[in-house]
């Protein structure tokens, strides 16, 4: 049975109109801790007196005017932990969380006023020593109540928990697997502010949840100072997530964001402290400053939320991590319970009055509770509707496309569909083939250029050799000591040379067909000359056209044939080789179309003729060498042929 006027009863009435009911004020209960042994030793007096269940009277020392404060419930030092749990209204919040609401319980007050004690009981007396059940705080009692409640629901409920602390303005995961690292606070439209990548642990039993609580408590920062031997140096937030779906039924969510569903969050704030009173130095002072700053930001937000014009005013929730994470509880869609803790000692009166004023203001702040479950429940239905709409649109578009294509090409619908499916694949294949051909072409081009260069070098070498040979023969013919006259000084060439001179020095002209100086003998026209080259036997006698050039090397001593005839044949052959080289030297103005002999590797196609050319050059060299050797070993002919040894000086 609920007490008349209790926070449970008030909250239940304010939410009776449904999950999206009217504005609901923050519920505030006051807890007055007993005088500590140290305070009693110092002879300090209590300045706080309860009047009924909801009013607190403050009697300043020295007989000043009394001040009264009214809250949802006032729980004096005589009340046990169990009394506090039953009277503060946390069970009602648990019920609302089970219905999908986002609920928050937070303790507030000066350092050493009993906030942590109220939520989790006295500090553990040793490693792994549990808090005695009679001293267990609101959190342990709520856990037990909730687990029991869930067991009797008769419907699947998934329970999970996260535990974090805000220490020196950094969010640290108290349940992280490794050492806690700072986590960012993000915001999105559906969830508001949330901690990214926070570890959320599923639990199925009270023992498992208690273990999570102990893990977090043991990792939370606390230090000793004058007013509290186990002072919390951070704000701690333990959140229970309640979902009425099994893990398989849950819609997929971003792993970095918290789960959707009902929430019950317990916030143990670090207490405001006067650095002078606590004697904090160094790191303790830095922590105290950080705590005070964030509590100041919280107070500022609460003041602005009380402003009747607040709809127009901006609430600076972004000023601190604490106000960001409490934004929904203070001014949003959550249901909030504040447990204000005070010390009865006269020495703490200024801070106590400040807390009381703060708490009084806070209970005038209202929220507009809204269960997020509606959005979750609607999701599958909304998705199904969207899917049906898209399927219908898809069918309609497909039909229109079939109609258009059939009209255009007369193809059947099935073939059109097939063609559409395959078109993309074909396009991809063509692109790949294109790329392959492009590479092959570039390789061909490279090898062709290489071959041309080699060809040019070889042709130049052949030409140089020819010139050398020509000059040697000429000197051989004229006799030792005589310098051959420049052909330019002789008579002009006969008109049988149809082609323009190709190889010519600035002062000499050489027949392009037979490579001889034009002034010395008349070269026959090409049509008469070539048959003799190809068929030397065809020349029966010694026509003038078959006469060897004057620089032809002498015949070998053992040869049956006339040396002149033999040398003529040899030199004609040399000339033909030179001609062939000349023909290969011609470079077309545009790159030729690649002619692909079957099964030839691309790298060899362009260069295939180079070894041939080199062989010919080698043959030419051999020929010249053997001619010269013959010349050296044979005495000069009576017709004036000189020994090559006398003529050709080695170069
Ligand atoms: P806070 O968290 O506000 O800084 P604590 O909860 O740590 O303060 O309490 C400070 C000290 O007072 C602790 O040693 C705690 O055990 C003791 N204390 C607080 N409240 C009570 C209470 N209601 N009954 C007995 N001891 C209490
Ligand atoms: Mg504390």
Image: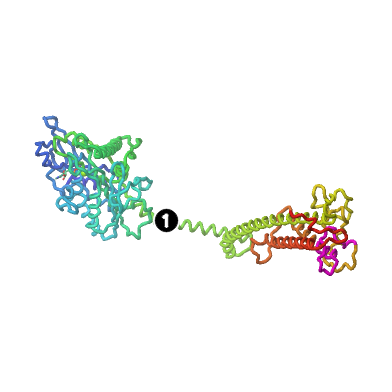
Queried whether the magenta region covers residue 347, the answer comes back as no
Q: Residue at x 72, y 61 (%)?
A: 618
148 over 72 or under it: above or below: below
User: What is the quadrant of residue 277 in the picture?
Assistant: top left
| 181 relative position to 511: left or right | left
Residue in front for this viewpoint, 129 or 19: 129
Mark 1 is surrounded, within 10 Å at the Cα level, by few (under 14), some (14 to 19) or many (20 or more) other residues, namely few
| 592 relative position to 307: left or right | right
Residue 490 at x, y percent in the picture: 88, 50
Determine if residue 609 is in view.
yes
Which color scheme does this rendered protein use?
rainbow
Residue in front for this viewpoint, 359 or 236: 236
| 616 relative position to 284: left or right | right
Name the residue that disc number 1 marks.
383
17 over 390 or under it: above or below: above
Residue 193 at x, y percent in the picture: 34, 45
Helix, strand or loop for disc 1: helix
Residue in front for this viewpoint, 41 or 443: 443
Queried whether the magenta region covers residue 565, the answer comes back as yes
User: What is the quadrant of residue 341 in the picture?
Assistant: top left
Residue in front for this viewpoint, 73 or 226: 226
| Number of numbered discs overlaid on the protein picture | 1
Quarter of the picture for ligand 1?
top left
Determine if residue 23 is in view.
no
Residue 420 at x, y percent in the picture: 57, 61
Some atom of ligand 2 lies within 8 Å of the CB belonging to the residue at label 1: no
In the image, the segment drawn in magenta is 544-571
Residue 73 at x, y percent in the picture: 18, 43
């Amino acid at each position: 049975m609920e007490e008349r006027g209790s926070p449970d009863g008030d909250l239940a009435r304010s939410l009776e109109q449904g999950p999206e009911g009217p504005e609901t004020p923050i519920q505030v209960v006051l807890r007055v801790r007993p005088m500590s042994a140290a305070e009693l030793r110092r002879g300090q007096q209590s300045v706080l007196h309860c009047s009924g269940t909801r009013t607190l009277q403050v009697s300043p020392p020295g007989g000043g005017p009394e001040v009264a404060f009214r809250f949802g419930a006032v729980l004096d030092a005589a009340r046990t932990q169990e009394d506090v749990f039953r009277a503060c209204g946390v069970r009602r919040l648990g019920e609302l969380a089970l219905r999908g609401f986002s609920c928050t319980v937070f303790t507030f007050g000066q350092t050493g006023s009993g906030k942590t004690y109220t939520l989790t009981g006295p500090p553990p007396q040793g490693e792994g020593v549990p808090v005695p059940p009679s001293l267990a705080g609101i959190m342990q009692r709520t856990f037990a109540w909730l687990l029991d409640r869930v067991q009797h629901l008769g419907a699947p409920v998934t329970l999970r928990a996260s535990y974090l602390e805000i220490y020196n303005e950094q969010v640290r995961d108290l349940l992280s697997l490794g050492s806690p690292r700072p986590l960012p606070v993000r915001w999105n439209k559906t969830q508001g502010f949330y901690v990214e990548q926070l570890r959320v642990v599923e639990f199925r039993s009270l023992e498992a949840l208690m273990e999570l609580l102990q893990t977090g408590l043991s990792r939370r920062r606390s230090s000793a100072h004058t007013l509290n031997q186990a002072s919390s140096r951070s704000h701690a937030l333990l959140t229970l997530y309640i979902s009425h779906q099994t893990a398989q039924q849950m819609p997929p969510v971003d792993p970095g964001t918290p789960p959707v569903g009902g929430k019950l969050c317990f916030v143990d704030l670090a207490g405001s402290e006067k650095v002078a009173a606590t004697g904090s130095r160094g790191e303790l002072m830095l922590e105290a400053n950080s705590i005070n700053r964030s509590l100041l930001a919280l107070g500022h937000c609460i003041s602005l939320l009380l402003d009747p014009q607040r709809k127009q005013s901006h609430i600076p929730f972004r000023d601190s991590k604490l106000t960001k994470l409490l934004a929904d509880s203070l001014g949003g869609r959550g249901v909030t319970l504040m447990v204000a803790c005070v010390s009865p000692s006269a020495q703490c009166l200024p801070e106590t009055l400040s807390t009381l004023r703060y708490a009084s203001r806070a209970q005038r702040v209202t929220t507009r509770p809204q269960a997020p479950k509606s959005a979750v429940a609607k999701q599958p239905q909304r998705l199904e509707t969207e899917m049906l709409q898209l399927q219908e649109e898809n069918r309609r578009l497909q039909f229109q496309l079939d109609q258009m294509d059939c009209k255009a090409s007369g193809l059947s619908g099935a073939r059109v569909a097939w063609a559409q499916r395959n078109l993309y694949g074909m396009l991809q294949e063509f692109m790949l083939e294109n790329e392959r051909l492009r590479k092959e072409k570039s390789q061909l081009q490279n090898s062709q250029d290489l071959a041309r260069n080699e060809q040019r070098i070889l042709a130049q070498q052949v030409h140089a050799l020819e010139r050398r040979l020509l000059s040697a023969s000429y000197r051989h013919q004229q006799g030792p000591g005589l310098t051959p006259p420049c052909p330019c000084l002789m008579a002009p060439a006969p008109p049988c040379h149809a082609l323009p001179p190709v190889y010519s020095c600035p002062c000499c002209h050489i027949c392009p067909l037979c490579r001889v100086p034009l002034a010395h003998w008349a070269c026959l026209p090409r049509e008469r000359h070539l048959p003799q080259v190809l068929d030397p036997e065809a020349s029966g006698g010694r026509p003038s056209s078959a006469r060897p050039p004057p620089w032809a090397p002498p015949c070998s001593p053992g040869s049956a044939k006339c040396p002149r005839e033999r040398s003529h044949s040899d030199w004609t052959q040399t000339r033909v080789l030179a001609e062939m080289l000349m023909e290969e030297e011609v470079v077309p103005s545009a790159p030729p179309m690649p002619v692909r002999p079957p099964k030839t590797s691309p790298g060899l196609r362009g260069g295939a003729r180079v070894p041939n050319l080199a062989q010919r050059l080698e043959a030419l060299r051999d020929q010249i060498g053997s001619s010269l050797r013959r010349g050296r070993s044979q005495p000069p002919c009576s017709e004036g042929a000189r020994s090559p040894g006398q003529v050709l000086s080695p170069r």
